[in-house]
Image (cartoon, rainbow, N blue to C red):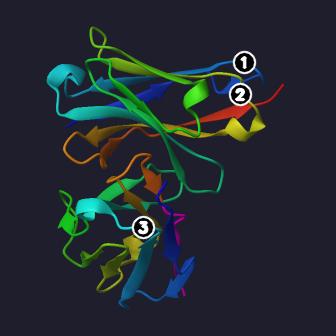
Amino acid sequence: QVQLQESGPGLVKPSQTLSLTCTVSGGSISSGSYYWSWIRQHPGKGLEWIGYIYYSGTTYYNPALKSRVTISVDTSKNQFSLKLSSVTAADTAVYYCARADGGGNYFDYWGQGTLITVSS
Amino acid sequence: EIVLTQSPGTLSLSPGERATLSCRASQSVSSSYLAWYQQKPGQAPRLLFYGASTRATGIPDRFSGSGSGTDFTLTISRLEPEDFAVYYCQQYGTSPLTFGGGTKVEIK
């Protein structure tokens, strides 16, 4: 059973960079066939795809966030990470990591999510 | 970007009743690349369907998905107490991947 777990600071100051890591267990990131994804949900709102990465390092980002997003992968640790720069209060959200099926890009496994608050 | 509009916003029903949820796309979703998720408070979304009508592992058959092109439907034939939740559709045929705004199914 694949499990994903987000980790990172819950509070980030405005203008700083949000950094999160997702640790994958029960399966290898390097196994191929999947894209490793970040999705966020603003409080009480819907879901927004941020981007994803293939184990080879190929990335795809949402154009709405592309200028501020970097997703990277560390196959030796079975982890992938998100960096979102120049954050504002509008970036306060629950951030989820998830696995996207490579054949279809729907999300079949999700982390529990972590609330990130942007505040001074 | 494909915009997904879900309706109604809230559906108030009793256990045992039938629920019909709609997801309409601003342009055709290629190859019926449409997924449905269920989300309960404080939990991550759970995949219900992909390919518009293919049930994910472990999803009971009282749930069904249908549709193509721009109109998709999620049906719950007889609501169980654990089905009261928020449901989202997602298209993955065109980048960026997008989600609908959700339909809340609440107990009447």
Q: Residue B70 carries which label?
A: none
B32 left or right, relative to B101 = left
Q: How far apart are marks 1 and 2 (CA)?
A: 6 Å
Q: How far apart are marks 1 and 3 (CA)?
A: 37 Å
Question: Residue at label 1?
Answer: A16
Question: Between tags 2 and 3, which lies in front?
Answer: 3
Mark 3 crowd level (few <14, some 14–19, many ≥20, 10 Å Cα): few
Q: What residue type is labelled 3?
A: Gln
Give the quarter of the figure containing the N terminus of chain A.
top left
Residue A87: horizontal and vertical position, in percent? Answer: 71, 27
B52 left or right, relative to B102 = left
Magenta highlight range: B100-108
Residue A4: horizontal and vertical position, in percent? Answer: 35, 32
> What chain does badge 1 belong to?
A
Q: Is residue B74 above or below residue A14?
A: below
Q: Is residue B76 above or below residue A101?
A: below
Q: Which amino acid does label 2 sit on?
A: Val
- In the foreground, A59 or B85: A59
Q: In which quarter of the view is residue A54 placed? A: top left
Q: Which mark is residue B27?
A: 3
Q: Residue at x 26, y 18 (%)?
A: A56
Q: What residue type is labelled 1?
A: Gln
Residue A35: horizontal and vertical position, in percent? Answer: 29, 33
Q: Is mark 3 on a helix, strand or loop?
A: loop
Q: Which residue is drawn at 44% across and 35% down?
A: A51
Q: Do labels 1 and 3 share a chain?
A: no
> What chain does badge 2 belong to?
A
The reply to whether residue B104 is visible in this rendering is: no
* Mark 1 and mark 3 residues within 8 Å of each other at the beta carbon: no
Question: Residue at label 2?
Answer: A87
Q: In which quarter of the view is residue A34 placed? A: top left
